[in-house]
Amino acid sequence: MTFVAGFPHSERPVAVVTGATGGLGAQICRTLADAGYRVVAGYRSSAETALALVEGLPHGGHCALAAPVTDSAALARLAADVGARYGRCDVLVNCAGTTRFVAHEDLDGLDDALIDDVLATNVRGPFAMVRALRPLLAKSTLAGGAAVINISSIAAQTAMGSNVIYCASKAALDNLTKSLARALSPEIRVVSVSPGLVDTEFVKSMDAAWRDEQASRTPLGRLAQPDEIAHAVLAAVRDLRFTTGCVLPVDGGRPLK
């Protein structure tokens, strides 16, 4: 029998990652795959990007599936496909999210359509994913139980971010983490991983002076790297087996300064 990262090759746990084609989601997929997990890369519309991602992941057994988190019927099909392919789901990483920069004082600029989109994607989406995959997650044999990891943001705590509703959506997500952790225990653990500003390619494309200012406001003097967030996700899944219903900050101590 062959083993991958301590798992029998044919019994490797399965992790579904939404928003997998983004800079952070893709890195989470790579880190989980490196650790021996079979990865389902969930995408909304970027099928080719998701397929290219899974083809480059190590150890094989991965796939790309449509996971439009605002479409509950599509998520039911996703869950059925995961069950048919693997017969299990051990980890769900809710990384899909959306926002748009709107100054906090510009209330008219934060139009109803944007508000609805942010809340539907960032709050209802993670709940809908858990609802769809709950039967598979509840049967997981992973040590410590199945794990749901919600990718939150420091904006939930500081109320400073791309717009007012984005901040509110992440605060709601952290609250959802606590409620679901209680409701789904003991079979399923639920944890929020809460990054500060992450230095993805999107962020690197922004004004350098703004990025430097953000870094200077962090006690550790720099922005978070995508792999640091991904390793926090892995730690929450693999190592922190007695942890649930909490927010795990990966923000360089930003609230301290």
Image: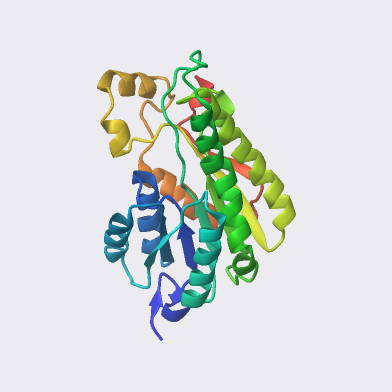
| Colouring used for the render | rainbow
Residue in the image at 57% along x and 44% along y: 192
Residue in the image at 51% along x and 66% along y: 77
Q: Quadrant of residue 213?
A: top left
Residue in the image at 55% along x and 24% along y: 158
Please determine whether, in this image, residue 227 is positioned above or below residue 107.
below
Q: In which quarter of the image is the N terminus?
A: bottom left
Q: Which of 250 and 14 is in front in this view?
A: 14
- Number of numbered tags placed on the structure image: 0
Q: Which of 20 and 153 is in front in this view?
A: 20
Q: Quadrant of residue 50?
A: bottom left
* Identity of the residue furthest to the bottom in this view: 1
Q: Which of 249 and 89 is in front in this view?
A: 89
Please determine whether, in this image, residue 69 is positioned above or below residue 83.
above
Q: Quadrant of residue 59?
A: bottom left
Residue in the image at 62% along x and 36% along y: 172
Residue 225 lies, in percent from the top left, at 35, 39
Residue 155 lies, in percent from the top left, at 52, 29
Residue 42 lies, in percent from the top left, at 42, 57
Residue 9 lies, in percent from the top left, at 41, 78
* Identity of the residue furthest to the top in this view: 105
Q: Can residue 154 be seen in this view?
A: no
Q: Is residue 137 visible?
A: yes
Left/right placement of residue 208 relative to residue 192 reads left
